[in-house]
Image (cartoon, grey):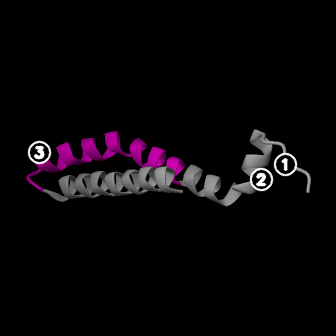
Amino acid sequence: MKPQHISIKNLVIRFKWRISFTLGLVILESVLDLFFPLLIGLAINDLIAESYGGTIHLAILGFSLLTIGTCRRFYDTRV
């Protein structure tokens, strides 16, 4: 049996689903990061109008980002 040459290409081919999943989580995390300025502005506007809707949306975004980031880091180090 011929030993397989170790290269980036061979590693990507061998672990394509794991790399794709990790890349997907990184992209999702980055996209969610883009919504922070928008939701901060909406939260401020809602607080001025004496409403907590924007603050709740901001908290949901923060918790979602924290959860996705934690899962991604856990997956990166374990798999």
At 56% from the left and 52% from the top, the residue drawn is 22
- Does the stretch in magenta take in 38? yes
**How many C-alpha atoms fall within 10 Å of the one at disc 1: few (<14), some, or many (≥20)?**
few
Tell me which residue sits at (79%, 47%) in the image.
Answer: 10
Instruction: Locate residue 56: give its quadrant.
Output: bottom left
Q: Secondary structure at mark 3?
A: helix
Q: Position of residue 33 (x, y in %)?
A: 40, 43
Question: Which numbered tag is attached to residue 48?
Answer: 3
Number of numbered discs overlaid on the protein picture: 3
Residue 43 belongs to the span the image colors magenta: yes
Q: Is 32 in front, or is 46?
A: 32
Q: Which dot, 2 or 3, sits closer to the camera?
A: 2
Which residues, given as a range, are shown in magenta? 25-51
Q: What is the number of the mark on residue 13? A: 2
Q: CA distance from mark 3 to mark 1?
A: 64 Å
Q: Amino acid at mark 1?
A: Gln
Disc 3 marks a residue whose amino acid type is Ile
- Residue 52: % across, % down: 14, 56
